[in-house]
Image (spheres, rainbow, N blue to C red):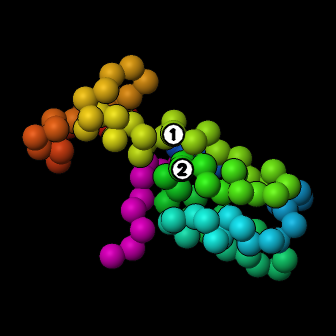
Amino acid sequence: MGNPVYLKNVVTLALDEGTCIGCGMCVEVCPHEVFLVSGGKARIRDRDACMECGACSRNCPVGAVSVDAGVGCAAAVINGVLGRTGECCCVVDPKNPSKGTCC
C-alpha cells in the first residue's frame, strides 16, 4: 500500500528551491516521502501526500520549506472523528468513520 493521498491541491506546503541548500533534512523527517533531493536541491516528489505535520519546516536549517501545520485535511479529519467543532470542515460519524463528508 502506498502513501495516503489527501485532497488534491489543497496542502499549504511550499518549497523555495532558491533558498534550499540540499541538506536532505526534509527527506529525513517527512513521514510520507513528500520530498527527494535531486541535483543538489530538495524537490517536492508528491505534494498531495503531505499531511501538514510541519516536521519539514521545523527542521529546515535555512527556512526553505513552509507549511501551515495542522490546518489541512488530515487535521480536519482527526478533529471531526474526535467530535471537535470550529475550524474543522469535516462531518464524521465517530461510530462509523467511513460515513460522512470532508471538505
Q: Secondary structure at mark 1?
A: loop
In terms of depth relative to the viewer, which is nearer, 78 or 102?
Answer: 78
Point 27% across, 35% down: residue: 82
The picture places residue 78, in percent across and down from the top left corner, at 34, 41
Task: Please provide percent x and percent y for residue 74.
Answer: 41, 46
Q: Which residues are magenta?
A: 1-9
The answer, for residue 17, to whether it is visible in the render is yes
Q: Amino acid at mark 2?
A: Cys
- The spot of residue 40 in percent (x, y) is 84, 77
* Residue bearing mark 1: 70
The verdict on residue 3 being magenta is yes
Cα separation between marks 2 and 1: 6 Å
Q: Return the mark for residue 53.
A: 2
- Image quadrant assignment for residue 85: top left
Reply above or below: 20 against 95.
Answer: below
Q: Which quadrant does the N terminus fall into?
A: bottom left
